[in-house]
Image (spheres, grey):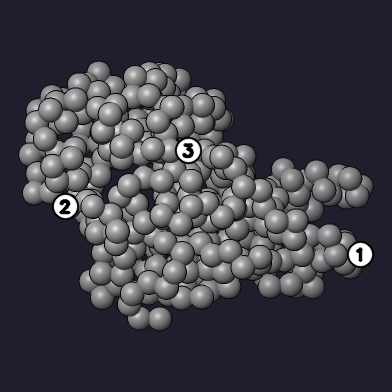
């Protein structure tokens, strides 16, 4: 399901290829796209007048046809535990999205949103409770990452499409954003440090495997038992467990890269012996790394954190499957997996 951008989205609706097309239609040189990308995403200028190496006529045309529509910071919360930061942004049309900054030593990871809201409706995730408002443009995604780095005063080293939305339901814009982030004229983040997290859209995984860049894939599984997964993730009922497993095997064979399998552990739901056995069978023989995530508290969701994370990890490792329990980050400001909404977060502004 997609929800198109509003007509007034401006330059944020375009990736580098879109900019090059716009410039070509005006008879402008292709290298102008590099200049514009550099000004927008490496330098973060607020007006076209600041793009001093562009001709005045081109700056005027850009301002008229592709207006700048910067994100407006509505709220910022900072974890007192680990300096994780949660941001609520207002877009030009009034829609809101969130992103999270996760510092760790010399790394800074930004979790960015690809849609305002989400249509997947996962039972344990706060984002889906409000439904889908609209897709984001490539520039709206890339600006989230740039602005978080600016707030920390340091270079972003990693970015993950793991905020609000299903990235493969907004595939072209998400790939355009990754390329702006990877672009040396843009954010200059290495391809292997850019990750897309999907609920398991098989067609998207297959398409992603054929992309030339070495972007990274993460897939939310949450149960290898079809009935349980359908209940937890109603938005991907048509994406069967068997088809998803085949897609992961094909992806690894085509790319040589190891995707992550995300697994939110919920007490009494997907941590039972039968569920763990099914997970081990699903992963055995696949080139995957399993990220076990004790479910995070979400208002209105009947999901209890388990005590079984270490037991599930040990069962996987014992079967020869790489597995870790994800370290909690930002829980005190509701910035952890599944907790992003479109409202003010707890914590200091």
First in sequence: mark 2 or mark 1?
A: 1
Residue at 28% x, 29% y is 227
Q: How far across and down, in percent of the image, does residue 331 sit?
A: 26, 64
Which callout, 2 or 1, points to the residue nearer the camera? 2
| First of labels 3, 1 by sequence position | 1
**Along the line of sight, the residue nearer the viewer: 66 or 263:** 263
Which quadrant does the C terminus fall into?
bottom left
Residue under numbered circle 3: 215
Q: Nearer the viewer, residue 190 or 317?
A: 317
For disc 2, the marked residue is 305
Residue 245: x and y in percent read 34, 22
Please tell me which residue is depicted at 66% across the width and 65% down the height of the picture: 93
Residues at discs 2 and 1 in contact (Cβ within 8 Å)? no
Depicted 45 relative to depicted 327: above or below: below
Q: Work out whether mark 2 precedes mark 3 in sequence or the reverse, and give the earlier one.
A: 3
Label 1: which residue?
Answer: 57
Q: Secondary structure at mark 3?
A: loop
Residue 105 visible to an observer of this rendering: no
Q: CA distance from mark 3 to mark 1?
A: 37 Å
* Residue 246, image quadrant: top left
């Amino acid at each position: 399901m997609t929800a198109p951008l509003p007509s007034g989205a401006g330059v944020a609706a375009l990736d580098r290829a879109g900019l090059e097309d716009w410039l070509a239609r005006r008879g402008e040189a292709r290298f102008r796209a590099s200049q514009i990308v550099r000004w927008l995403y490496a330098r973060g200028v607020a007006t076209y007048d600041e793009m001093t190496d562009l001709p005045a006529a081109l700056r005027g045309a850009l301002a008229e046809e592709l207006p700048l529509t910067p994100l407006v910071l509505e709220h910022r919360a900072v974890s007192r535990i680990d300096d994780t930061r949660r941001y609520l942004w207002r877009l030009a049309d009034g829609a809101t999205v969130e992103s999270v900054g996760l510092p760790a030593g010399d790394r800074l990871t930004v979790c960015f949103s690809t849609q305002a809201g989400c249509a997947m409706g996962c039972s344990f995730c706060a984002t889906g409770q409000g439904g889908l408002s609209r897709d984001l443009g490539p520039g709206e995604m890339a600006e989230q990452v740039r602005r978080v780095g600016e707030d920390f005063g340091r270079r972003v080293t990693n970015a993950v499409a793991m905020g609000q939305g299903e990235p493969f339901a907004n595939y072209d814009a998400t790939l355009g954003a990754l390329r702006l982030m990877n672009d040396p004229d843009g954010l200059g983040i290495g391809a292997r440090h850019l990750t897309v997290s999907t609920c398991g859209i098989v067609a998207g995984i297959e398409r992603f495997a054929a992309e030339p860049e070495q972007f990274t894939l993460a897939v939310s599984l949450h149960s290898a038992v079809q009935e349980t997964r359908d209940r937890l993730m109603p938005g991907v009922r048509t994406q069967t467990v068997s088809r998803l497993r085949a897609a992961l095997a094909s992806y690894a064979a085509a790319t040589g890269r190891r995707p992550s399998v995300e697994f939110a552990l919920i007490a009494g739901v997907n941590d039972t012996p039968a569920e763990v056995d099914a997970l081990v069978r699903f992963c055995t023989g696949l080139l995957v790394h399993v990220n076990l995530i004790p479910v995070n508290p979400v208002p209105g969701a009947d999901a209890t954190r388990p005590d079984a994370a270490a037991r599930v990890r040990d069962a996987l490792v014992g079967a020869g499957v790489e597995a870790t329990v994800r370290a909690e980050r930002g829980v005190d400001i509701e910035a952890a997996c599944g907790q992003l909404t479109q409202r003010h977060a707890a914590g200091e502004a």
